[in-house]
Amino acid sequence: MQTDKELLELAAKAAGINFGYSIDGDAEEVLVFFDSDDEHHQQIDWAPETSDGDSRRLQVALKIDLVWNFVIETWNASFFILLG
């Protein structure tokens, strides 16, 4: 089983997003993403797991079609009148 970090790395590679690692204030390694088109490699927010826009751009990059199917179920009720 892969960790969330490993899955994000693979998704970034597949989408052509540059990434690297940074050390935060607690000396922990943090995964950071960079703009592929920016010559200065400016850090960007990229979170396909929480952002619908980033998720959709990842789907487009991987040529994944998302199809919604709705099923409407009906309930038929029968009424009986008892004549006595």
Image: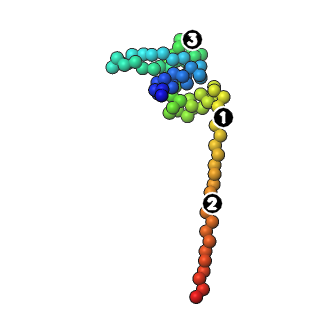
- Front disc: 2 or 3: 2
Secondary element type, mark 1: loop
Name of the residue lying farthest toward the left: 26
Residue 55 showing in the rendered view: yes
The answer for how far apart the CA atoms under marks 2 and 3 are is 57 Å
Residue 34: x and y in percent read 52, 18
Decide: is 54 above or below 31. below
Q: Nearer the viewer, residue 78 or 1?
A: 1
Depicted 3 relative to depicted 34: above or below: below
Secondary structure of residue under mark 3: loop
In terms of depth relative to the viewer, which is nearer, 32 or 68? 68
The earlier-in-sequence mark between 2 and 1 is: 1
Reading the image, the residue beneath label 1 is 65
The image position of residue 36, as x and y in percent, is: 57, 16
Question: Is residue 31 rendered to the left or right of residue 28?
Answer: right
Whether pointer 1 and pointer 3 mark residues with C-beta atoms closer than 8 Å, the reply is: no
Q: Residue furthest front?
A: 1
Q: Which residue position is annotated with label 2?
A: 74
Q: Amino acid at mark 1?
A: Asp
The alpha-carbon separation of the residues under discs 1 and 3 comes to 31 Å
